[in-house]
Image (cartoon, rainbow, N blue to C red):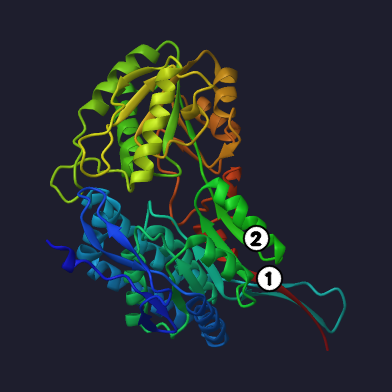
Amino acid sequence: MSASDHLRAQLFIAGQWRDGGAGTVNDLVNPATDEVLGTTPRASIQDLDDAANAADEAFRGWSRTSAVERSAILNKTAALLRERTESIARDLTREQGKPLAEAELEVALSAETFEWFAAEALRSYGRTMPARFSGQRQMVINQPLGPVLALTPWNFPILLPARKIAAALAAGCTVIIKPAEETPSPTVAIAQALHDAGLPAGALNVVLGVPSEISRHLIAAKAIRKISFTGSTTVGRHLAGLAAQYAKPSTMELGGHAPVVIFADADLDKTVAACVAGKTRNAGQVCTSPTRFIVHESIRDEFVVRFGQAMSELKVGEGLDPGVQMGPLANGRRLVAVGELVDDAAAQGAEIVTGGSRIGTTGNFFQPTLIADAPFTARAMNEEPFGPVALVNSFTDVEDALAQAHRLDVGLAGYVFTQSADTAMAMGEELQAGGIGINSFSVSSIEAPFGGLKDSGYGYEGGYEGLDGYQHHKYINHVA
């Protein structure tokens, strides 16, 4: 399979594909092979203004399109994504690196996302309240906020755009989306599917280029009425500040450093298997990835041995190769960053149980790595590794476990492994995070809200809350 088979990345503005007007491009590189797959265009300021104008003009019609019509287009888009799964998933793996099976699942979940919000568009109920006085009618109606700027990262390059695009369109908003420059093709595929499904021109626009330039220019654009961002806490704070300057609402789904509290009564066979799969999914490049494993002291040694052995046996390789369980890191920046965190932990006295090094010299492969007894001063204990690095420390009692879990000011996900119903219920209530997994690492489902606390952001995606974030609730008091 050659680079010429790869979907070409272009801007999509006002229903038309175009090359960026900035005159320069970035290489699009396969993180497993270092092969150049193509180029990513750069939008000019004129391109950005054209996208804002297109979204603004399209909003007048799309916001008045019936929920039934909007729903039909989103359902058709879902069907087209399913029909095109093979090509979309292949391009996703070549750009991002994850195993093909993970890419195929991501496309399937993206189609499901469009179907969910297609149905949710039909359930966007307002309400009528009992009138205070005779001859008066009091009601609340839900209306779309307006054109939305959506900014998404490279780790889930079709699912995260799908969450924002589907919810916004279902609410009656129009969208400008900027996907990550490293992984543009899945968003291009969504745009093509929506176009083929009959979405009016300008209701979705795709721009690529210099991230800081795009965000700064479009957040300030008068047409944009809402910002939705998924990414690091540092960037999220900056973008939230920009949005606040213009009093524009925003949804911020930011970083995590998820704790996993493993009690003495946990089923170790099931727990270790789940921990390996959860930690190495997408090579650990997941904002909800389990990272800080806090294990009861009575089972700590056995857990470390079994976890380390299982991590060392994983098959790491190019995502398109059969049987591969973990692909490369998505870019060279992550390779350097993960290596530095591991080296720092070792220098501070932590035990590298398994892994800890780059694999080979081609691609961005890094060994699944288990680190035991890293001190709290180690960088990896304080900075989200965003890679296949697990850190194990022990705890003595529940208070100790909660203190360790809450030591960092993040709260996107938290996990508990126990066979006690009482412990599960108590920890589910006590852990400070947006999503809690009990004997599971699944904390993100389209039918449920997904969002964080503290430095992990605010606002929700998924569930009816995901639609609500793109709507204004207008109160109407009508006196006859």
Q: Is residue 407 above or below residue 219?
A: above
Give the SS element for disc 2.
helix
Q: Alpha-carbon neighbours of circle 2 within 10 Å: few (<14), some, or many (≥20)?
A: some
Residues under numbered marks 1 and 2 in contact, where contact means CB atoms less than 8 Å apart: no
Query: Which of the 4 image quadrants contains residue 429?
Result: top right
Residue at mark 2: 242
Q: Nearer the viewer, residue 36 or 159?
A: 36
Label 1, secondary structure: give it: strand
**Which of the pair 316/194 is nearer the observer?**
316
Q: Where does residue 80 sit, x and y in percent of width and height?
A: 28, 73
Q: Quadrant of the C terminus?
A: bottom right
Q: What residue sits 53% from the left and 48% below the top?
A: 254
Query: Could you tell me which residue is drawn at 43 percent across and 36 percent down?
Result: 385
Reply above or below: 103 against 347: below
Label 2 is placed on what type of residue? Leu
Q: Which residue is mark 1?
A: 473
Q: Residue at x 42, y 77 (%)?
A: 21
Q: CA distance from mark 1 to mark 2?
A: 24 Å
